[in-house]
Every structure is written in C-alpha cells, then in structure tokens.
Image (spheres, rainbow, N blue to C red):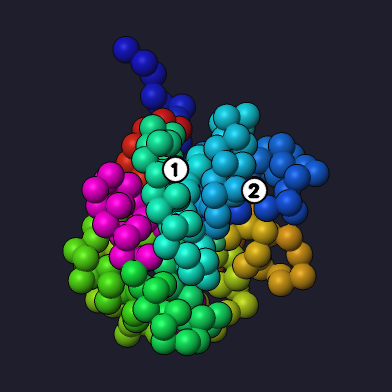
Amino acid sequence: MTDKSFQPRYTLIDTHTHMCDPAFDPDLSAVLERAKDAGIAAVVAVSESLSDAKKNSELAAGHPLIRPAAGLYPTFLDLAHAQEMHQFIRNHIDTLVAIGEVGLDYWVVKEESGRELQREIFRGFVNLGKELNLPLNVHSRSAGRHAVAILLECSATRIQLHAFDGKPEAALPAVEAGFFFSIPPSVVRSRQKQKLVRRLPLSCFLLETDSPVLGPSPQERNEPANALISAKAIAELKGLQEAEVIEAISENTRRLYGDLIKSC
Ligand SMILES: [Zn+2]
C-alpha cells in the first residue's frame, strides 16, 4: 500500500500558456522550475498554428511539466489549414491534452464573410473535440456571446473559455451548460474580469496565465508561476479563504482535465 499522506490535497494546473513563444526560448527550464516551486503540477501549452503544435510537442518531450494542446488561432481563415490541423490532432491524440486554442475573434475579423468562415472552422474543431473526447481551449475575443451560442448549438461538453472578455450575462448560459472559465493574472487590473469573477460561481473557475501575456503588469513577461495570483484574486473578490478557492479550482480542473491530473 502506498502512503499518500504526504501528497497535497490539490493539483493546480496552468491551463492556458504559450510555452512555444520565442519569449521563453532563452530560459524555459528556469521558467518551468519556478512554476513547479509555486505548486503548478502541469502547464497546458496551446498552439496557434501547425508550427506551434510541432514545437509544443517537442518541448513536451523534453519537459515533463509541459502538456501540449493543438489548435488553430481564429484569425487564420483557411479551411485547408484547419483540415491539416485536424489531421495533426488525430495523429497526436495520445499525447495531446486538449484542442486549442480555437474559437472566434471578432476584434480582428470585422467582415461578415470572414466571421462566417471563422464560425465554420470553429464548429469543425468543436465537433472534432466531441468525437475525440478532448477538452476545447476556447478563445473568444469580442465574440463571447457568439462562441457560447455555437458551443451550445453543437452540444459541446468539455469546454474551457479562456480569458473571457464578455459580460457576465453572456457567460451565464455557459456556466449552466457546465463550461469552465479560466482566469488570468490580469484579473488584478481588469474591471471586466473582476466583474466576471464576482458574478460567476466558484465551481466554474480554472487557473491560466496566457503566458507570456495577460500578466499582473502589462509591461512584464507573464509566466506560469503567476497562476496563483489568479487564485488569490478570486479569493479576495469573492471574500473567501485562499485555501478554499484553491481546493475548488483543483476539483474543477480535475472535472475538465481528469486524465491529465491522473498523470501528474
Ligand atoms: Zn492564448
């Protein structure tokens, strides 16, 4: 029988990072060491393109803390490129922990024809996630309501809305559907994110950093060790003990990323 008494009761994961970003090339090992010291058991590395996905898979092979996800950033409006990404995901199903990041970006894409294509590509990834039973790591800039509508229409189940920038009212149907919302450290300086945290239930939150961006200060490179800043902010905004928030987030993470947690 193994003695589990020394294991922590919780497992925290930074559920959305860009570890393949060149900003981390010079000192990735040190960055991951700091994350580990801060209590982060795994770092989900999302991809914006095929080259990102390949780099993340390589990084994961050399750094056990990194868990790769593959997806196409919503501003790539190219069906052939999306199909190539589908194939990459199918070929790497054994090592990928999620599909992402995928979604909608109406802040960059303003033309209706471009948005229609974006929705079509997004639906393709939602259905692939359902087919392969992989969590979907969703980007939804200036399109929160629209992304949620597509996810509901497709009866998606394993969903993480990352850095959601919509109103709480747009998020509530997603909460009801059992979707999760990952909160970046920029919550300490974003009134919109603070509003979201106050209104949504603790049972839907995950930690993310979106490193190297969305840090507590916009000028500095963000890194996974900062994920705990989000937990602290959620505790303060909700008037709860930090330990209670960490335990709840750990349980939420297990609900969405169960297999990943088991392997930590
Ligand atoms: Zn991102």
Asked if the residues shown at circle 2 and circle 1 are in contact, with their CB atoms under 8 angstroms apart, the answer is no
At a point 24% along the width and 61% down the height, the residue shown is: 156
Q: Which residue is mark 2?
A: 20
Mark 1 residue crowding within 10 angstroms, few (<14) / some (14–19) / many (20+) = some
Give the Cα distance between marks 2 and 1: 17 Å
Place of residue 252 in the rendered image (x, y in percent of width and height, measured from the top left): 34, 53
Place of residue 239 in the rendered image (x, y in percent of width and height, measured from the top left): 44, 72
At a point 40% along the width and 26% down the height, the residue shown is: 5
Depicted 39 relative to depicted 227: above or below: above
Quarter of the image where ligand 1 sits: bottom right
Specify the quadrant that holds the C terminus.
top left
Magenta stretch bounds: 121-142
Residue lying furthest top in this view?
Answer: 1
Amino acid type of the residue that numbered disc 1 sits on in the rendered structure: Phe
Q: Which residue is mark 1?
A: 88
Amino acid type of the residue that numbered disc 2 sits on in the rendered structure: Cys
At a point 60% along the width and 48% down the height, the residue shown is: 51
Depicted 93 relative to depicted 107: above or below: above
User: Residue 190's quadrant in the figure?
Assistant: bottom right
